[in-house]
Image (tube, grey):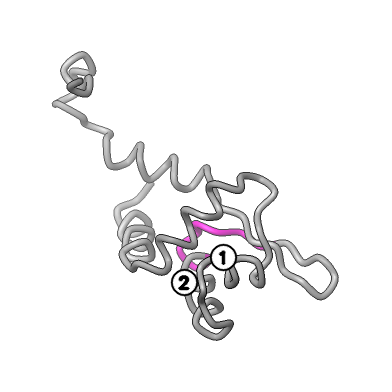
Amino acid sequence: MESKTAVSALAALAQDSRLAVFRLLVQNGPAGLTAGVIGEHLGLPAPTLSFHLKTLAQAGLVSTVQEGRFVRYRAEMAAIEALVAFLTENCCGGGLNRCVPKE
């Protein structure tokens, strides 16, 4: 992953509503959710939700599938996995044994 891509993804997630949308989509896995369900669950009005979903999609964190009149949104798990890998690429100077979380 390039730094520019990582910055775009992090910027998209650096807002409360967008982070909540992304986390909700992650919880629902490959099935995803329609915008209406997301809006109801998070109490976001349609225009606001549309703006946030567009930002997440532009950052590559959310994908869409048209289903008749509805659009289903899914978290792009490969993108978030790539972001985490990018952030931890040189964890502890490459000494993985030193990166074990403290209990």
Q: Which residue is mark 1?
A: 41
Q: Is residue 58 magenta?
A: yes
* Residue 71: % across, % down: 72, 68
- Under mark 1, the amino acid is His
Above/below status of 64 relative to 80: below
Q: CA distance from mark 2 to mark 1?
A: 19 Å
Q: Give the percent coordinates (x, y) of residue 63.
A: 61, 59
When asked about the image quadrant of residue 97, the answer is: top left
Q: Please tell me which residue lies in front, 8 or 36.
A: 36
Q: Which residues are magenta?
A: 57-64
Q: Is label 2 in a helix, a strand or a loop?
A: helix
Q: Earlier in the sequence, mark 2 or mark 1?
A: 1
Q: Amino acid at mark 2?
A: Thr
Q: Is residue 79 above or below residue 54?
A: above
* Tag count: 2
The residue pinned by badge 2 equals 55
In the image, 1 versus 34, the foreground residue is 34
Q: Position of residue 86 (x, y in %)?
A: 32, 41
Mark 1 surroundings within 10 Å by alpha-carbon count, few (fewer than 14), some (14 through 19), many (20 or more)? few
In the image, is 35 to the left or to the right of 62? right
Of tags 2 and 1, the one toward the viewer is 1
- At a point 56% along the width and 65% down the height, the residue shown is 41
The residue nearer to you, when weighing 12 against 21, is 21
| Residue shown at 17% from the left, 22% from the top | 102
Asked whether residue 90 is drawn in magenta, I would say no
Determine whether label 2 and label 1 are within 8 Å by CB. Answer: no
Label 2: how many Cα within 10 Å (few below 14, some 14–19, many 20+): some
Give the structural element (helix, strand or loop) at label 1.
Answer: helix
Relative image position of residue 42 (x, y in whole percent): 51, 68
Hey, which residue is sitting farthest right in the picture?
68
- Tell me the quarter of the image containing the C terminus: top left
Q: Residue lying furthest bottom in this view?
A: 47
